[in-house]
Image (cartoon, rainbow, N blue to C red):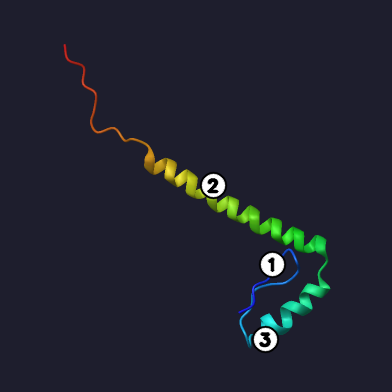
Amino acid sequence: MEEKTAASGTHSHAEGCFFCDTAMPMLEHMVSEATRDHFRNSRVEFLKGLRSLLDERIAHLAREESKGTHVTVE
């Protein structure tokens, strides 16, 4: 298996995969660097959104719930 990075305009692929061996290399030559940057940034923003959802859920679960009611004694 060959490891390559998106920044260099290449990708990871499996041997014998049409998409990896043929389609991706062809698309990489047809798409500009600016377009690749936009798609990379959108992936980063998507992951940041997931992180935000997880952080909110963790904060919700970590809040201490009251374990009873307050009663005033005279």
Task: Specify whether 26 is left or right of 71.
Answer: right
The amino acid sitting under disc 3 is Phe
The amino acid sitting under disc 2 is Ser
Q: Nearer the viewer, residue 35 or 16?
A: 16
**CA–CA distance between discs 1 and 3?**
19 Å
User: Residue drawn at (64%, 55%), measured in percent from left and top?
Assistant: 44
Q: Quadrant of residue 30?
A: bottom right
Q: Quadrant of residue 12?
A: bottom right
Query: Quadrant where the C terminus lies?
Result: top left
Which of pointers 1 and 3 indicates the residue nearer the eye?
Answer: 1
* Element marked by disc 2: helix
User: x and y percent of residue 15 in the render?
Assistant: 62, 85
**CA–CA distance between discs 2 and 1?**
26 Å
User: x and y percent of residue 31 in the render?
Assistant: 81, 69
Task: Specify whether 7 is left or right of 62.
Answer: right
Q: Nearer the viewer, residue 20 or 50?
A: 20
Disc 3 marks which residue? Answer: 18
Q: State the mark number for residue 27.
A: none
Disc 2 marks which residue? Answer: 52
User: Residue drawn at (73%, 84%), measured in percent from left and top?
Assistant: 22
* Element marked by disc 3: helix
Question: Of label 3 and label 2, which has the lower sequence position?
Answer: 3
Question: Of label 2 and label 1, which has the lower sequence position?
Answer: 1
Disc 1 marks which residue? Answer: 5
Q: Residues within 10 Å of mark 3 (few under 14, many from 20)?
A: few
